[in-house]
Image (tube, helix red, strand yellow):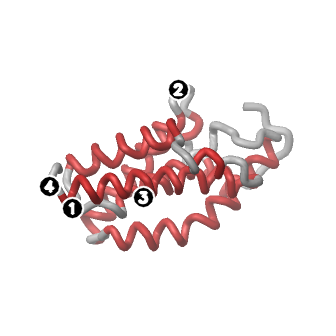
Amino acid sequence: MKVKKATSPLSFALATWFGCGLSPKAPGTVGTLGGLIVAIPLITYANFTPWHFILLTAVVTPIGIWAANKTIESTGNQDPQIVVIDEVLGLWLTLAGAARFNWQSFLLAFALFRIFDITKPWPVRNLEKLHGGTGVIVDDLGAGIYAAVVMALAGWFNLY
């Protein structure tokens, strides 16, 4: 990825989720995995609940939009593949739908979010049209909401 002007190290680190977005293959998948790698210790050691992931997503979203905007400015690309903080936020929102946390729910959250992020069902695809970092982030939040609903339904039926 060609950089047209320098960006701050902090915005670059956040936008690429500490380098996950620099993966030469499947940066979105690697970014999603990076979000899960942060979520599991939060659940295990800080006793995070689904509500905590809603709050965490709400707090980090404006920061993610800022970081995505800075990366967009520095690359000149409206949706740079190296920006993966949107995948992290989408995964966290997906975890907010979990009825319980275990290895099956982590695997299901990962798979569901990737499916909804890649397919972008209506009206999520329309959110990509929003300007700058907002569009980059919000479409993944939409995918995360769809995935969270499926997680909640699967949990209700004790499928994980």
Label whose residue precedes the other's in the sequence (2 or 4)? 2
Q: Which mark is residue 158?
A: 4
Furthest toward the left, the residue is 158
**Circle 1 residue:** 100
Callout 1 touching callout 4 (CB < 8 Å): no
Percent of width and height locating residue 43: 28, 64
137 or 139: nearer the eye? Answer: 139
76 or 46: nearer the eye? Answer: 76
Q: Residues within 10 Å of mark 1 (few under 14, many from 20)?
A: some
Q: Residue at x 72, y 48 (%)?
A: 129
**Circle 3 residue:** 92
**Circle 2 residue:** 25
Q: Residues within 10 Å of mark 3 (few under 14, many from 20)?
A: many
Pair 3/4: label in front: 4
Callout 1 touching callout 2 (CB < 8 Å): no
Q: Amino acid at mark 1?
A: Arg
Label whose residue precedes the other's in the sequence (1 or 3)? 3
SS assignment at label 2: loop
Separation of marks 2 and 4 at Cα, in angstroms: 34 Å
**Where is residue 93, by image quadrant?**
bottom left
SS assignment at label 3: helix
Q: Residue at x 77, y 51 (%)?
A: 7
From the viewer's perspective, is 109 left or right of 81? left
SS assignment at label 1: loop
Percent of width and height locating residue 116: 46, 43
From the viewer's perspective, is 49 left or right of 35? left
Separation of marks 3 and 2 at Cα, in angstroms: 22 Å
**Where is residue 108, by image quadrant?**
top left
Label whose residue precedes the other's in the sequence (1 or 4)? 1
